[in-house]
Image: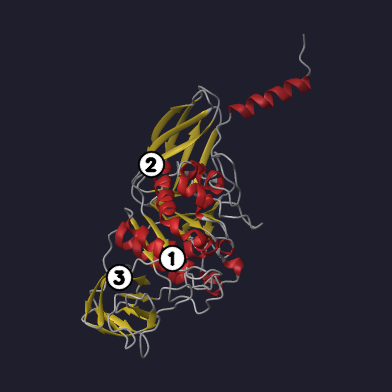
C-alpha cells in the first residue's frame, strides 16, 4: 500500500526532529566556559545515538552515547583562558558552537538589589553605558519563572556586554565581573538568576526546608505579595537547577531584605541553601554575599538581627561578606543606588580569597572581644591591623548598658586599634552595641576605608515590636 505523501512528510519530520542533537540554552555560541577545568557538556538526542564532540583549542575528539532516557552528558578539558574558540557536535545532525571564550564563570543571584539594572534608572550604569562594550564579558540573564519540580532548561541566551545588555543585567554582577576582567585579564561569564522581593526559601530546594521542622515552620511566614513567588524551591527549580551542570568559579548573593521577619532562622536557612547549591553543582565553590543596608523596616530591630545572622553565616566554609552601612544615605529606600561599590567589594573578596591576588582590601573589621576596665569597655576587632578611624567629630550609633539592660548613648574613642566606650550614665557597664538597629548608619571605619560591621557584645533578647 502506498503511504500518502503528506503522511510520509509528517513522519519524516517527526523522525528528523527526534534524531537531532539538542542542547540546553546555557550551552550555546558566545558562552564562557570555566578555564582549566573538567567542564560538562550535556543535552538530548535519540537513545543510543553516538555523538562526537571536537574542541577547536586542541582538536581533541570526545565521544558519548545517548542513554535510554534520551539524555547524554560528558566531560571535556579546558585549557587556560583564551578564545574565541568553537565546539562541534556531530551525531545525526551537526551543531557548531562559535565565539566561545574560556575564563571565569560566576553566578549572580538574590532579590531586587541584585536584580537592579540599567532599566531601573541607575546613574552608575547610565554613566558607563556609552563605553560599556567589552567582548570579554558575557552575560546569561535567566528569565523569571517558577516550577514545582527541577527543570532541565531555562529561557536565556548568552550576550556580549554592551550598552543594551546593561539595561537588563544585574548592575552588581556587571561591576563585579568588570573588576575581575580588569584585574585577572581573562574573559568573565556571568549568570544572572535574580528576582526582586524573593525570600531565600524560594532559592532553596524544597526538600531542604520540608525535611527541617524549624525551616518548615519559618517558611510559613513568607507570605505572597503578588509580585514574586513565595513557595520553597520554586525559583531554584526553574532558574538554577537547570544550570547546575555548568561548571562555575563561584557565586555572589545579595538578598535578605525579605527574610527580616524570620531573622532568627536565617543563618540556618542560608547556610543550608549554600550547601544545597554546592551539592547540586558538585563543587565546593566560594560564596560571597552582601550584608543588607540600613532601612526603616516595619518591625523594630529586624534588619539588625538579619545582618547579625548574615555575619554569623561567615563561619560557614569558603564564604565572605561585604558590609554596606556606608553606601546609602536614605534609610527609607530599600534599594541603595550605589551598586558599583557593592560589585567592586565583592570582586575584592574574590581577588583576594579565590584568586590569591595581593593588595586588595576586602575584610571589614569585625567585633572580636570586649574587656571591662572599671567604667569603660574596650572593644577589639578582627581585620583592623592598620587601625581604626572615626569619620566626623565623634562616634555615632554607639550605646552602652549595665546589668539593667538599659542602653544609653555612649562616648567612644579609638586607642591602639581598639575602641574605648563609656557613658556617665553607666558606672558598671556590661554590654555595648554599635550600629545595631534597622536604620543605623555608623561612622567607624578601618584606616583602609572599609566600614566596621554592626555588632553587639550581648546575647540578650532583642525586642522587635
**Residues under numbered marks 1 and 2 in contact, where contact means CB atoms less than 8 Å apart:** no
Q: Residue at x 37, y 74 (%)?
A: 405
Question: What colouring does the structure picture have?
Answer: secondary structure
Q: Which residue is mark 3?
A: 367
Q: Circle 3: is it few (<14), some (14-19), or many (20+) Cα within 10 Å?
A: some
Q: Position of residue 114 (x, y in %)?
A: 51, 62
Circle 2 or circle 3, nearest the eye = 3
Q: Circle 2: is it few (<14), some (14-19), or many (20+) Cα within 10 Å?
A: few
Residue 67 left/right relative to 349: right
Q: Which residue is mark 2?
A: 282
What's the mark number on residue 305? Answer: 1
Is residue 422 visible to the viewer in this orientation of the structure? Answer: yes
Q: Is residue 63 above or below residue 162?
A: above
Separation (CA) of disc 3 from disc 1:
15 Å
Q: Quarter holding the N terminus?
A: top right
User: In what element is the residue under mark 1?
Assistant: helix
Circle 1 or circle 2, nearest the eye = 1
Disc with the residue nearer the chain's start (3 vs 1): 1
Q: Is residue 397 above or below residue 52?
A: below
User: In what element is the residue under mark 2?
Assistant: loop
Amino acid at each position: 500500500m502506498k503511504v500518502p505523501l503528506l503522511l510520509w512528510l509528517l513522519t519524516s519530520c517527526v523522525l528528523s526532529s527526534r534524531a537531532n542533537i539538542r542542547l540546553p540554552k546555557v550551552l550555546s555560541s558566545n558562552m564562557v566556559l570555566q578555564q582549566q577545568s573538567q567542564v560538562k557538556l550535556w543535552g538530548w538526542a535519540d537513545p543510543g545515538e553516538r555523538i562526537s564532540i571536537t574542541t577547536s583549542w586542541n582538536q581533541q575528539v570526545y565521544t558519548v552515547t545517548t542513554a535510554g532516557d534520551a539524555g547524554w552528558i560528558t566531560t571535556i578539558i579546558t585549557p587556560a583562558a583564551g578564545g574565541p574558540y568553537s565546539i562541534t557536535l556531530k551525531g545525526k545532525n551537526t551543531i557548531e558552537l562559535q565565539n566561545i571564550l574560556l575564563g571565569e564563570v560566576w553566578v549572580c543571584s538574590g532579590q531586587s538589589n541584585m536584580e537592579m539594572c540599567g532599566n531601573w534608572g541607575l546613574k552608575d550604569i547610565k554613566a558607563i553605558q556609552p563605553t560599556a562594550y567589552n567582548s570579554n564579558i558575557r552575560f546569561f540573564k535567566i528569565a523569571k519563572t517558577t516550577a514545582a519540580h527541577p527543570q532541565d532548561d531555562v529561557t536565556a541566551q548568552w550576550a556580549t556586554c554592551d550598552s543594551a545588555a546593561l539595561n537588563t543585567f544585574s548592575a552588581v554582577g556587571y561591576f563585579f565581573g568588570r573588576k575581575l576582567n580588569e584585574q585577572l585579564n581573562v574573559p568573565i561569564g556571568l549568570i544572572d538568576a535574580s528576582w526582586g522581593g524573593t525570600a531565600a526559601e524560594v532559592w532553596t530546594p524544597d526538600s531542604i526546608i520540608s525535611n527541617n521542622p524549624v525551616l518548615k515552620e519559618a517558611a510559613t511566614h513568607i507570605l505572597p505579595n503578588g509580585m514574586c513567588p513565595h513557595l520553597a524551591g520554586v525559583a531554584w527549580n526553574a532558574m538554577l537547577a537547570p544550570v547546575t551542570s555548568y561548571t562555575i568559579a563561584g557565586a555572589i548573593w545579595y538578598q535578605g531584605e525579605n527574610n527580616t521577619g524570620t531573622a532568627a532562622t536565617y543563618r540556618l536557612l542560608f547556610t543550608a541553601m549554600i550547601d544545597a547549591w554546592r551539592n547540586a553543582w558538585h563543587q565546593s565553590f566560594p560564596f560571597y554575599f552582601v550584608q543588607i543596608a540600613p532601612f526603616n523596616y516595619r518591625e523594630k530591630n529586624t534588619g539588625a538581627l538579619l545582618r547579625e545572622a548574615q555575619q554569623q553565616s561567615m563561619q560557614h566554609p569558603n564564604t565572605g561578606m561585604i558590609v554596606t552601612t556606608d553606601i546609602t544615605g536614605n534609610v527609607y529606600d530599600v534599594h541603595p543606588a550605589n551598586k558599583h561599590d557593592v560589585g567592586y567589594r565583592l570582586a575584592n573578596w574574590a581577588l583576594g580569597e579565590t584568586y590569591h591576588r595581593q593588595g586588595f582590601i576586602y575584610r571589614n573589621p569585625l567585633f572580636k572581644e570586649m574587656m571591662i576596665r572599671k567604667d569603660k569597655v574596650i572593644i577589639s576587632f578582627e581585620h583592623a591591623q592598620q587601625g581604626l578611624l572615626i569619620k566626623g567629630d565623634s562616634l555615632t550609633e554607639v550605646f552602652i548598658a549595665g546589668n539593667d539592660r538599659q542602653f544609653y548613648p555612649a562616648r567612644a574613642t579609638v586607642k591602639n586599634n581598639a575602641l574605648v566606650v563609656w557613658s556617665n550614665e553607666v558606672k558598671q557597664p556590661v554590654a555595648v552595641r554599635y550600629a545595631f538597629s534597622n536604620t543605623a548608619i555608623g561612622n567607624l571605619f578601618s584606616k583602609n576605608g572599609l566600614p566596621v560591621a554592626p555588632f553587639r557584645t550581648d546575647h540578650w533578647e532583642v525586642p522587635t515590636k
